[in-house]
Amino acid sequence: MKVTIVSPERTLFAGDAISISVPGAKGRFEVLRHHAPIISSLTNGQIHCKGENVTVIDIKGGFIEVARDEVFVCVEV
């Protein structure tokens, strides 16, 4: 699936991933291919994006949108 993670300052990650794990407002959750569409707010914690390598990003909050095997994350770091 295609994942894009941005902050107000810059793009933090853009590429293909097998999974992405995020700190949701009601608890941590993981997104895999063919995930149901969702929009959720994010809290303070870490994003783990697994592709060829694992990318870990510390965040203060933000939101995630998942639709049609595309994930868009806007965060404050």
Image (tube, rainbow, N blue to C red):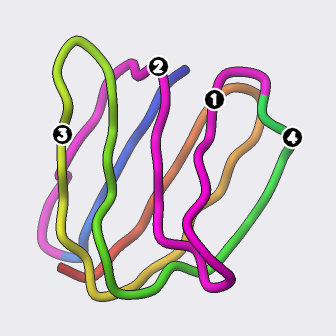
Please state which amino acid type lies under the numbered disc 2: Ile
Q: Which residue is mark 4?
A: 36
Q: Where, quadrant-wise, is the C terminus in this rendering? A: bottom left
The region drawn magenta spans: 9-34
The Cα–Cα distance between marks 3 and 4, rounded to whole angstroms, is 23 Å
Disc number placed over residue 18 in the picture, else none? 2
Disc number placed over residue 32 in the picture, else none? 1
Disc number placed over residue 55 in the picture, else none? 3
Labelled pair 1, 2 in contact (Cβ < 8 Å): yes
Residue 6's place in the image compared with 23, above or below, is above
Residue 65 in the magenta stretch? The answer is no
Closer to the N terminus: mark 3 or mark 4? Answer: 4
Please state which amino acid type lies under the numbered disc 3: Thr
Which residue is most to the front? 27
The Cα–Cα distance between marks 4 and 2, rounded to whole angstroms, is 15 Å
Residue 19 in the magenta stretch? The answer is yes
The Cα–Cα distance between marks 4 and 1, rounded to whole angstroms, is 9 Å
Q: Secondary structure at mark 4?
A: loop
Left/right of residue 65 with respect to residue 49 in the rendered view: right
Labelled pair 4, 1 in contact (Cβ < 8 Å): no
Please state which amino acid type lies under the numbered disc 1: Leu
